[in-house]
Image (cartoon, rainbow, N blue to C red):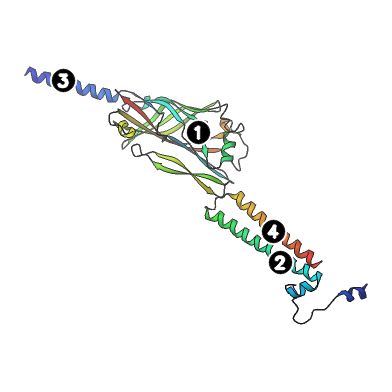
Amino acid sequence: MTASRSSQYAPPRPGDNLFGMNSTASTNNTAAGNTARAPRATHALRLAAAVLFAGTVALWAATGAHRGWTQTSKVVLQQDEITGIDFPVHQKTFVAGVEVLAVGVAFAAALVTASLLTNRRRKV
Amino acid sequence: MNTARITLASLVLGSIALVSAHAAPQSYDFKDPKGVNNVQFKLDAPLESITGTATGVTGTITFDPAAPAATSGRIELATKSLTVGNPVMQEHLHGANWLDVGQYPVISFEAVSAANVRSQGSQILADVTGRLTVKDVTQEVTVPVSFTRLADKLGARLGDDKIKGDLLVVRAAFVINRGEFNIQPGQYTDKVAEDIHLSLAIAGASPRE
């Protein structure tokens, strides 16, 4: 078994890209091609997760870091000139709530998990 | 001499009539064509704070600035007019589990008596006791209320100087417990506070011929 495994193993040569990013190497070897695609997918998933996480947090913070549910309208108080009564005027708006934050973070976590699985498959 | 006496008597009688007319109880209609009359509510639970407004105010109040303790009347609020910022939350609020606006379309307050009446500038302050009915449950509550009578301001408010009449602005802020009115008593207290903070600002009109 040991002899068989060692016979399949080709030690890296000077100049070889150990992470499979060398396009020349990947076109010459099927296994190396798989390892090239896997890190790209891993990086893409992690990048997407980071962008999604940052975007969600930024959206939530930019719309007021509201700790309740998402609001699709807000109330602006105006004052009646004669009576002095403050009365509500409803305006359409979007205030991201905690569920938007939770969904965004959950999707980001799912993407990170998928990237880890992709990475593990590459190592196997 | 006689002419002077007659003139003096006329002036005195006229003044008395004028004072009586102003001191007489007036009935104010709180149906508001401008949609300004409103009630704001806030529930501050540990996990969630809910704020909203309602504008479906109607009713009448009889108010006499010379005898504010005799104030009486009834104010109604259409439950369908309660609004919150989140449409799903509003659907729940109007639904059968909470206010059930289909079966209980009105929240009402009927003033019974006023005590601790005092003046503060142009305002008259009083503690008004009345019957508050929510979801067919009636509780007696005492509410601190301020009355501001705006004489001859009805025309200005309606944008027509030919219309003569007075306005009565009523403001009140008080707290009720939703459990006492059979609104999911003891349930979901982490997200929906049991104490409901209410703030009311309404203006009624009393037109004159």
Q: Image quarter for residue B155?
A: top left
Q: Amino acid at mark 4?
A: Leu
Front one among B30 and B139: B30
Q: CA distance from mark 3 to mark 4?
A: 92 Å
In this image, A22 relative to A92: left or right?
right
Q: CA distance from mark 4 to mark 2?
A: 14 Å
Q: Nearer the viewer, mark 2 or mark 1?
A: 2
Q: Nearer the viewer, mark 3 or mark 4?
A: 4
In the picture of the structure, the residue carrying the numbered disc 4 is: A111
In the picture of the structure, the residue carrying the numbered disc 2 is: A40
Q: Residues within 10 Å of mark 3 (few under 14, many from 20)?
A: few
Same subunit, labels 4 and 2: the answer reads: yes
Q: CA distance from mark 2 to mark 1?
A: 55 Å
Q: Earlier in the sequence, mark 4 or mark 2?
A: 2
Q: In the figure, B87 relative to A111: above or below?
A: above
Q: Nearer the viewer, mark 4 or mark 2?
A: 2
Q: Amino acid at mark 2?
A: Arg
Q: CA distance from mark 3 to mark 2?
A: 102 Å
Q: Nearer the viewer, mark 1 or mark 4?
A: 4
Front one among A35 and B130: A35
Element under label 2? helix
Q: Position of residue B45 (x, y in %)?
A: 57, 43
Q: Amino acid at mark 1?
A: Ser
Q: Are marks 3 and 1 in contact (CB under 8 Å)?
A: no
Element under label 4? helix
Does the image show residue B193? no
